[in-house]
Amino acid sequence: MPSKMFPDAINSLALFAGISPEERDNFLRAGHIRKLSRGEYIFHRGDPVKHFYIVCSGNVQLIRETPDGKEITTDITSRGKTIGKMDILQAFHQHTASACAIDDVQVLEFPATWLKEIAKHPVISLNILSSMSQYVHMVEIESEQKSTMSVAQRIGCFLQRLCVMHGFDPRGFELPYGKALIASRLGMEPETFSRGLATLKDHGIKAQNAKIVFCDIEAMEDFVCDHCSMAGECPTHYNLSSFPENKNKKSYT
Amino acid sequence: MPSKMFPDAINSLALFAGISPEERDNFLRAGHIRKLSRGEYIFHRGDPVKHFYIVCSGNVQLIRETPDGKEITTDITSRGKTIGKMDILQAFHQHTASACAIDDVQVLEFPATWLKEIAKHPVISLNILSSMSQYVHMVEIESEQKSTMSVAQRIGCFLQRLCVMHGFDPRGFELPYGKALIASRLGMEPETFSRGLATLKDHGIKAQNAKIVFCDIEAMEDFVCDHCSMAGECPTHYNLSSFPENKNKKSYT
DNA sequence: CGACACTTTGAAGACGATCAACGCCGGTGG
DNA sequence: CCACCGGCGTTGATCGTCTTCAAAGTGTCG
């Protein structure tokens, strides 16, 4: 029984919010566990969509290749997140990105039809819609940030979101994966990431190797804008006022 | 009766695909028409979400302001598209962007609760999930393009999508709105857009004032990658092989 | 005709990508 | 135990691209 094996992951699933544990476990019985080791692919872009996944442990990288062979990391999913939701629900029955295990990973695998089935459940349907809306919002904001913010600012935002999402201690935590991966996630080169991280020391974020320390917790409060207050998953603007180019500018209420 | 007034817009609504016209009109009776003139706002970012909209005529610009007062155009919606869907479905009950009429606009306005109600309908629920998944895919790809493609390429992609979505004649059509707006939509400055458009002449796209001509229709065929083939709404890569930096690189199958 | 909004062009500067080299660390094998 | 190697991250120098600021051109509408 899955819920015995991964109680933490299962209990916090947004997918089943508002559903009784019994009904939920009933749904979950359709799935089985799949283990992958670092570097293994769960599926490749272009594969026909046959399954739907919930990450139980480890981190999974969603990758899309550009025509010139470069890899862009669309997202990094950790425990409790779902993979392949969108691909199933689209009319286009192929995966739009590849999924690769960053660490050793355990996922719950369900048949694709199962998702369409449970999506008919009114509560679950709204849960999916809600989490998808939230994801859209995040992607839109990140896209906007690529056009309007400097590398340093985007890194600061990412670190803050990382900290909030994983429940890390803002006074000191370790990056959960390599810097090259984060750089790819942010759509920049590793060198650029490295340099950007260095400049953040002047803005209240210290970084030594993989250790990150938010020195100015007050500044972090500013970070919780109205976007964030809703779910803690909103990528926002770190400590904007500390960036010289943002002096004398109105803040993001 | 709305369906009499805007038959084209209503009949092509993805929201009601697979629903009988009678049942659909039954749903639509809850709405009423709202007219706006150019420059008027339908709602502002931060407003409590009270309504849900379907665009009947004209174009609506979705705007998000950055902390420094700059405006980024998140999306430009035309006839048959919905506005405010995501904002309703999120736990956060405020609009995440402002909506402004570009032209004189007519929208169908529904109470927000109506959407949550009809979302319980299994077919409509899947319709919403499907269109939202598709939108997510588009936003993700555009975000990726901001990191990987040149300005000229992004403009080419946009023009192609514009042409397909609006059913324009690729051998010559007029831009449906100003260039400054398009530049904002693409996350670049008007000057950059202007210069980028000029360079496209070397890649089979002529532009004089607002008139766009795709000279190399064969090249456009390449544009229809597997993403596009599904719905014609996929932003892809215009005529990649004509860009010198993409010679000898594998194509996007 | 003139006012105004929009677009284009030009020149300067900032920023990130790229290429190259170095340092650091863990593992492997002699 | 030490030498070697490969993965990863940093640093430096250079280049191309986009933004910015400034000014001129174009069109429309009164």
Image (tube, coloured by chain):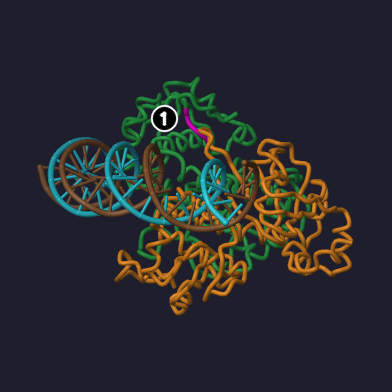
Chain colours: A orange, B green, C brown, D cyan
**Quadrant (top left/top right/bottom left/bottom right) for the C terminus of chain B:** top right
Q: Is residue C9 left or right of residue D12?
A: left
Amino acid type of the residue that numbered disc 1 sits on in the rendered structure? Glu
Q: How many marks?
A: 1
**Residue A218: x percent and y percent?**
45, 79
Output the chain of dot 1.
Answer: B
Label 1: state its secondary structure.
helix
Q: Is residue B102 rendered to the left or right of residue A61? A: left
Residue B190 picture quarter? top left
Position of residue B252 measured from the top left corner of the image (x, y, whole percent) = 56, 30
Pointer 1 residue: B245
Task: Please identify the dominant SS of the magenta region.
Answer: loop
Eyeballing the image, is A69 above or below A20? Answer: above
Which of these two is toward me, B122 or D19? Answer: D19
Nearer-the-camera pick, A81 or A58:
A58
Q: Is residue B100 visible?
A: no
> Height in image: B243 above or below B140?
above
Res A126 → quadrant: bottom right
The magenta-colored residue range is B236-240
Q: Is residue A35 visible?
A: yes
Q: Residue at x 66, y 60 (%)?
A: A131
The magenta stretch spans residue B239: yes
Callout 1 crowding tier (Cα within 10 Å): few <14, some 14–19, many ≥20 = few
Q: Position of residue A17 (x, y in %)?
A: 75, 67
- Does the magenta portion include A210? no
Name the residue nearer the viewer: A95 or A136: A95
The x, y position of residue B137, in whole percent, is: 60, 45
Residue shown at 62%/58% (left/top)? A133
Give the residue at the far bottom of this rendering.
A218
Residue B184 located left or right of residue A71: left
